[in-house]
Image: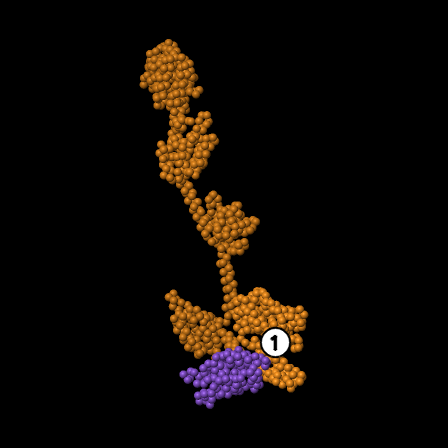
Chain colours: A orange, B purple
């Protein structure tokens, strides 16, 4: 674990420096074995450790040398790094005048050259009889040591130690001065380095404290080892609350990112490279601060990372601005999506669709984004001929509008293109396409209609007019007025009273009433009236009206069209007459028909009453003959009587059937829901005697649902069919009748099948006709009316009838009726 | 107050039918005397003769009228209509006996107060059956109403 102090720039470590200096001094003295010297050195070192600047250091060293050598004066020169001159940095024991004399030596002076030679020089004036300079003589210097100061292989100055008293400089002193001069070199180098460090540290400090960047330093355990005041200011914590704490546990990193941040920092410790990321911090009062953070690993002398310095800039505002911009853009796009016109953005170089609004996507039924515009919108393989890229790129900022027909959508558009900036900075084509198809079509329609109506108006023999109100004066009459009224427009305009003369007397009252309405603003849409033309002939005029009102709603004029409808009126009259004639004709015919019907009814009535009475007499008296005069009549006589009876009976059934047929033909038939099952049941009951007599078996199967029918008629029809079925069987064959129902497509079919003699195909059309008989009276008695009643009855009920038959095997008759509500 | 006797009034214009009906009555052995009139007017005047001013006042009225519809002078329907208006006659049972099966005839007969409607059968055998039933129902079983009760208080 590195100690905390190390996290600070280590140049500040004064203690360390002291230790190192002492170590050097020990080594030095250890080599010479001089205890006194060591003491001096230690003392010097101790004092140096308290020194503030270079001057202090030099003072301490010079005093130390003087004290140790017993010399009385000296100066320390430093070489100016730029010019190479020697400048006195510190001195002691010289007179001011002398100092004045010796404070500066140019680089090219003999003294400077002497120093730069790098060897110590000891001058003992008295002993060696070295000539003194004027200044030296005046000062009274007797000995002087000039010892160059070496530092990092260069002479950086010299230490001059002189005495006004001593005539020689002993060897010990010489060693001492040389050793301590070395100290000066080191001190100077250190001092210079320190100055430089101070400078850079100052620079760092300025950055650290005032640049607006938050600066953190972490150790390997993510503990904060340094924070600047911005960290405190931004996060709202005091320095004490932060230092030494684990940055994650502290909760200053947004919980969503703490894991990533922790692992990133750990990674930096091994990666040794800088990293940049956006980190969200949580302030003490809970706000989120977004920071652009640069992390730099710091290496120690072994090249190991000992700390991560993180410099973070608060970009919350920038982020918020970006967010706001993004939202604004989103909003804009959502507005575009809400617009029911086509809007899209494409890249003018690549033709890529960068944006398409919802309307456009819906119109094409696809996503469009990322596609190529001409392919997506027009189904083309290369850019379309209408592409405006060149036009709008040439004059950026100027929109370009044009009309365009899209064959894919089969719609017309007014298109506006212009270049806009896309968020990523490129110029893109923005297109707004307004659908004008309806407008186009309406225009087309109007053009067509116009042509049509122009033709119509031109072909119309009508007079357009405008009459001012309330004066009733004609302001305008189109030239056609002459065709319509027989008078010219000039005549009408010149003479306002003319119109009153023209109107047929029959319509004077009509117009008087209309006029009152008109002045009240009630405009009759049309007039139809008669006029008398200049030749004295009547004409019918049809006039359509439109009121013209002023701003206050007062009627000021009447406009419209007058047409001559005399021809139409004549036709109408004729039609009316013809219609009247037709009605008369119909009435006449109806009356005659009713008469005939009544006669027919009377006839039927009479038939049913009067025709039967003689039959009853014939039958009754024949029977009386047989009974009362049996002994008088012979065999032949009795047979004749029997024949009279039988003929009468046949006549009676003929009359019955005829009456029935007539009834079915004439009677009013109200159709209602009738149960077919009930009808069949009733018919069988009615025929019970006959069935029993013939020994017939009748089976009923299948559904017999409700039908639309007239009960009595249907009963008659069904009874006739069953009666037929049990009648026409070969001799000795017992009739077997199968009755079945069937339902199909809203129709109900009833089949009556027998095992009878059948009907040859050639007769099948005839059997439904009245009085048609296929067999002699002797074999199969009947009137030939039964099936005619079936046929007529079905026809009158809106039903159908038919039959199939195999001769010798049997017949199947069927009837069909619309399905009724009532169930069987 | 009149009362009804045993007589049956037969209003029938066809003499053949009269004979056959009488013969059927005879064959079925109905003892009730039959009084025959041959048109509507005669039927009315016969019935009127039982009124307080009539020559047969006090005599017993017919117990049943067999009425044809198609009659000379006045139709059976007219007779019925008149009869139901006569206070002293209106309860007399009337059985219509006619050739018509027309529903208009049937309905109007009932509307005018007929008590029964029978169609003359085509054969004598059927006539016999009918007369037999008629006797059983109208002569033997049917309870007779009081006649003229309302007039006499």
Chain letter of mark 1 equals: A
Residue pushed farthest top?
Answer: A127
The answer to whether residue A474 is seen in the rendering is yes
Residue lying at 37% horizontally and 11% vertically, measured from the top left: A169
Q: Is residue A318 left or right of residue A453?
A: left
Residue pushed farthest bottom?
Answer: B55
Q: Disc 1 marks which residue?
A: A785
Give x and y (percent) for residue B124.
59, 81
**Residue A134: quadrant of the picture:** top left
Residue lying at 43% horizontally and 71% vertically, measured from the top left: A524
A233 in relation to A122, above or below: below
Split into 4 quadrants, where in the image is the C terminus of chain A? bottom right
Q: Secondary structure at mark 1?
A: loop
The answer to which of B51 and A572 lies nearer the viewer is B51
The answer to which of A125 and A536 lies nearer the viewer is A536
**Residue A30: quadrant of the picture:** top left
Give x and y (percent) for residue A490.
45, 73
The answer to which of A287 and A529 lies nearer the viewer is A287
């Amino acid at each position: 674990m590195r100690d905390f102090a190390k996290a600070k720039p280590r140049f500040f470590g004064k203690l360390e420096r002291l230790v190192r200096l002492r170590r050097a001094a020990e080594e030095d003295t250890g080599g010479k074995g001089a205890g006194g010297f060591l003491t001096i050195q230690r003392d010097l070192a101790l004092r140096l450790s308290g020194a503030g600047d270079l001057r202090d250091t030099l003072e301490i060293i010079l005093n130390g040398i003087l004290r140790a050598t017993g010399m009385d004066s000296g100066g320390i020169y430093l070489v100016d790094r730029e010019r190479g001159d020697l400048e006195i940095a510190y001195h002691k024991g010289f007179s001011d005048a002398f100092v004045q004399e010796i404070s500066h030596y140019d680089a090219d002076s003999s003294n400077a050259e002497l120093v730069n030679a790098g060897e110590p020089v000891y001058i003992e004036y008295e002993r060696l009889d070295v000539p003194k300079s004027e200044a030296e003589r005046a000062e009274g210097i007797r000995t002087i040591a000039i010892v160059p100061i070496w530092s990092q292989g260069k002479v950086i100055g010299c230490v001059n130690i002189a005495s006004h008293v001593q005539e020689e400089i002993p060897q010990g002193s010489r060693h001492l001065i040389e050793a301590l001069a070395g100290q000066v070199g080191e001190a100077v180098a250190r001092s210079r380095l320190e100055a430089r460090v101070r400078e850079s540290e100052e620079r760092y400090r300025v950055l650290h404290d005032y640049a607006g960047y938050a600066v953190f330093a972490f150790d390997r355990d993510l503990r904060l080892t340094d924070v600047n005041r911005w960290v405190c200011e931004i996060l709202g914590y005091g320095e004490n609350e932060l230092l030494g704490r684990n940055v994650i546990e502290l909760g200053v990193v947004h919980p969503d990112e703490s894991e990533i941040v922790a692992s990133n920092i750990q990674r930096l410790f091994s990666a040794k490279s800088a990293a940049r990321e956006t980190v969200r911090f949580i302030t003490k009062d809970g706000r989120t601060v977004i920071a652009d953070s640069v992390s730099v690993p710091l290496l120690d002398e072994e090249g190991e990372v000992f700390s991560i310095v993180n410099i973070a800039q608060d970009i919350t505002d920038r982020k918020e601005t970006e967010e706001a911009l993004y939202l604004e853009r989103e909003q804009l796009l959502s507005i575009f999506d809400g617009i029911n016109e086509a809007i899209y953005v494409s890249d003018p170089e690549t033709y890529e669709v960068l944006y398409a609004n919802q309307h456009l996507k819906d119109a094409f039924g696809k996503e469009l984004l990322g596609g190529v515009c001409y392919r997506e919108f027009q189904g083309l393989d290369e850019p379309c001929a209408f592409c405006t890229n060149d036009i709008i790129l040439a004059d950026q900022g100027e929109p370009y509008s044009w009309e365009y027909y899209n064959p894919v959508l089969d719609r017309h558009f007014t298109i506006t293109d212009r270049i806009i900036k896309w968020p990523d900075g490129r110029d893109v084509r923005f297109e707004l396409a307004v659908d004008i198809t309806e407008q186009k079509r309406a225009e087309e329609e109007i053009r067509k209609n116009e042509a049509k109506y122009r033709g119509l108006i031109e072909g119309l023999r009508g007079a357009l007019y405008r009459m001012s109100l309330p004066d009733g004066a004609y302001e305008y009459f189109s030239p056609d007025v002459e065709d319509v009224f027989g008078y010219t427009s000039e005549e009408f305009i010149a003479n306002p009273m003319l119109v009153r003369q023209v109107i047929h007397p029959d319509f004077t009252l009509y117009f008087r009433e209309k006029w009152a309405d008109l002045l009240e603003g009630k405009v009759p849409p049309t007039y139809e009236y008669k006029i008398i033309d200049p030749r004295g002939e009547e004409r019918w005029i049809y006039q359509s009206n439109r009121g013209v009102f002023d701003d206050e709603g007062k009627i000021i004029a009447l406009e419209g069209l007058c047409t001559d409808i005399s021809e139409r009126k004549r036709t109408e009259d004729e039609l009316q007459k013809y219609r009247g004639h037709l009605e008369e004709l119909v009435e006449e015919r109806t009356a005659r028909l009713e008469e005939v019907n009544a006669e027919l009814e009377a006839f039927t009535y009479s038939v049913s009453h009067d025709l039967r009475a003689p039959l009853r007499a014939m039958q009754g008296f024949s029977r009386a003959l047989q009974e009362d005069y049996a002994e008088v009549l012979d065999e032949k006589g009795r047979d004749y009587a029997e024949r009279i009876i039988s003929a009468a009976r046949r006549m009676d059934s003929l009359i019955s059937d005829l009456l029935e047929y007539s009834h079915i033909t004439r009677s009013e038939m109200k159709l209602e829901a009738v149960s077919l099952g009930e009808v069949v049941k009733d018919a069988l009951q009615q025929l019970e005697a006959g069935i029993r007599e013939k020994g017939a078996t009748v089976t009923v199967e299948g559904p017999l649902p409700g039908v639309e029918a007239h009960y009595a008629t249907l009963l008659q029809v069904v009874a006739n069919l069953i009666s037929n079925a049990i009648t026409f069987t070969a001799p000795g064959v017992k009739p077997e009748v199968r009755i079945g129902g069937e339902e199909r497509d809203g129709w109900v079919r009833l089949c009556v099948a027998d095992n009878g003699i059948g009907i040859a195909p050639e007769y099948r059309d005839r059997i439904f006709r009245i009085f048609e008989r296929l067999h002699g009276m002797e074999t199969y008695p009947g009137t030939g009316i039964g099936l005619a009643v079936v046929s007529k009855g079905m026809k009158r009920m809106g039903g159908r009838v038919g039959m199939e038959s195999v001769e010798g095997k049997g017949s199947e008759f069927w009837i069909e009726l619309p399905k009724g509500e009532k169930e069987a | 107050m009149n009362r009804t006797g045993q007589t049956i009034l037969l209003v029938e214009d066809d003499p053949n039918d009269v004979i056959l009906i009488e013969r059927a009555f005879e064959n079925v052995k109905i003892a009730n005397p039959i009084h025959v009139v041959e048109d509507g007017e005669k039927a009315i005047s016969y019935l009127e003769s039982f009124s307080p001013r009539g020559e047969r006042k006090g005599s017993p009225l017919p117990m049943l009228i067999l009425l044809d519809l198609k009659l000379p002078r006045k139709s059976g329907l007219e007779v019925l209509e008149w009869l139901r208006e006569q206070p002293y006659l209106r309860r007399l049972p009337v059985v219509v006996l006619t050739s018509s099966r027309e529903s208009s005839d049937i309905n109007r007969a009932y509307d005018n107060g007929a008590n029964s409607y029978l169609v003359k059968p085509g054969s004598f055998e059927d006539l016999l059956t009918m007369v037999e039933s008629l006797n059983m129902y109208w002569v033997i079983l049917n309870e007779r109403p009081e006649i003229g009760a309302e007039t006499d208080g």
